Image (cartoon, rainbow, N blue to C red):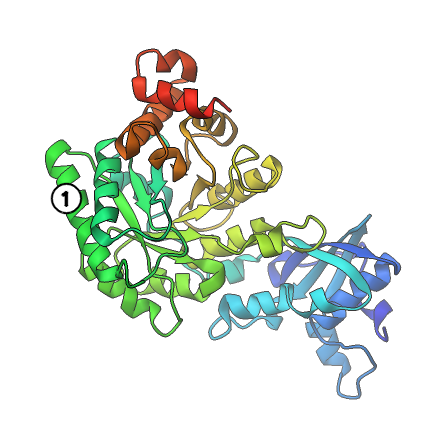
Amino acid sequence: MEYEERYLHLGEPIDVDAHVICEYRVKTDLKMTTAAAAIATEQSTGTWTKLSTLKEDNFLRRSGKVMAIEGDLTTIAYPVEDFSLDIGGVPQILSVIAGNLFGLEPLRKVRLEDVEFPKSMLKEFKGPKFGVEGLRSILKRPKKPLVGTIVKPKIGLTPQETAEYVYEAGMGGLTNGKDDETLSNQSFCPMEDRVVAIAEALDRVRSETGHVMIFAINVSTNGHQILEVAERAQELGATQLMVDVLTCGFGAVQVLAEDPSIKLPIHVHRTMHGAMTRDPEHGINMKVFAKLTRMVGGDALHVGTFGVGKMKGAAREDLANRDACLTSEVPYRRTMPVASGGVHPGMLKRLVEIAGLDLQMQAGGGVSGHPRGVRGGAMAMAQAVDAATAGIDLREYAKDHEELGEALRKWGVA
C-alpha cells in the first residue's frame, strides 16, 4: 500500500464539524495500521499503487484520515467535501463509508460499527414528518406503547380476507397493523383492492367503538414508481405507508417523507438487513441503518426484539438501534422503534422492561395463532400491554383476562 503513512493521523486533533467519523472492526493478518490505511485509501483519494494524478492539495483536503486504533477497532474520518448531498444523498454516503472496503483483499473481515455525521450534513435532511409524537397523536395514545399485528400468512389472503383480519384486530384493541414485506400487488391480493377493503374495515372499527387503528400498506417498488404508488394508496384511503428500505433504497423513504403530497406516516421494514448485520465481524451494524432511516424520514423502524424474539440479535445492539431512533442529539423528530419477529403476548412485559414505553410491539403469529383467533390474539396483546404499562405481572393480570391467560398457556412468559 503506497500511501500508508500519509493516511495515518493517530492521536491528532480533528474538526468534528468538518468530517464524517466512522468506526470499523477489522480482522486481518496485516498490521492494523496497514489495514486501517487501506480503508482510508480506498474510500477516499488513493488506490493500490502510487498515482501520478494525486496532487498534494487534493490529498490534504480530501483524503480519509485514520484517527485511532484500539485493538481490532479503527476510527476513520472523511472530510465533508467528499460527500455530495444534493444529488448523491444517502446512496453516495454509503458508497464512501461502506463501499469497496468490503472487498479489499488484505482484510479478512471488516464491519462498519458506527457513523457520526456533522451538523452541517444533518441539517440537509429533514427527518420524520410524524415520528413518535405524531403517531401517538394520530392514535390518541399519549403514553402506552403501540401494539400491532402483521397480517399472517404474509401472502395468500384475498383483500377481503385481509380486511376481515384487520377488522378483528382493531376490535381486539390493536393500534397498528401492516402488510408483510413480501406482499405487494400479487394477483390474489391487488394493492388497490386491499387498500379500499382495509380502509372500510378501519372505518367500521372506529364507527362501532371509537377506537383508532392505522394500517401500513406496503408500497415498496421501483424507484421511478414509488411516489405514484404511494399517492394512489393514499388516495384510496391508506392510513400509513410501508417501505422495505434496504431493498428499495434510502432514497425511496426520503422521497415519500419529503414530498408535500404525501400526508401519511412511513413505517420502515428492514428486510434483508441480516445479510449485512448478522455477522459480528463483517458487514454493517444495524445502528448505522437506523441513523440513516431517521435522517431520511422514517417514522417507525424495526429495530429487533432485544434478544427476546425469534430474530437473531443481541439485546445490546437492539438497544443501540432504539437509541438511534430516540436520541435527542440529532435535529429530528424521534422515530418509533418497532419490536417485531416472533412476538407474542407473553413477551410484551419483558420488552417494555428492556426498551421502555416509546415502543411499538407487533405480532403476526402471536395474534392469528391465538386459540380464539385474531380478535382473541389482539385482545391478549392489548391486555399484555396494559399489564406491562402498569407494571403488573402477566400471570396475575391473566387471572381476570381470559384471552391473555390462553396466550400464556400456549406460548408461555418470556
81 lies left or right of 303: right
Pick whichever, 291 or 60, lies toward us: 291
Query: Could you say whether the residue bearing mark 1 is in a helix, strand or loop?
Result: helix
Residue drawn where x is 46% and y is 46% of the image = 302
Q: Amino acid at mark 1?
A: Asp
Q: Position of residue 94 (x, y in %)?
A: 58, 65
Frontmost residue, 117 versus 48: 48
Q: Is residue 411 visible?
A: yes
Residue 168 location in percent, x, y? 23, 36
Residue lying furthest left: 207
Question: Residue at the spot x=71%, y=55% of the render?
Answer: 24
On the image, the x and y values in percent for residue 4 come to 85, 69
Q: Residue at label 1?
A: 203
**What residue is shown at x 31% (from left), y 17% (from top)?**
402
Residue 12 picture quarter? bottom right
At label 1, counting other C-alpha atoms closer than 10 Å, the crowd grade (few under 14, some 14-19, many 20 or more) is some
Quarter-of-image position of residue 45: bottom right
201 relative position to 342: left or right:
left
| Residue 361 visible here | no
Name above or below for residue 312 compared with residue 218.
above
- Residue 238 located left or right of residue 285: left
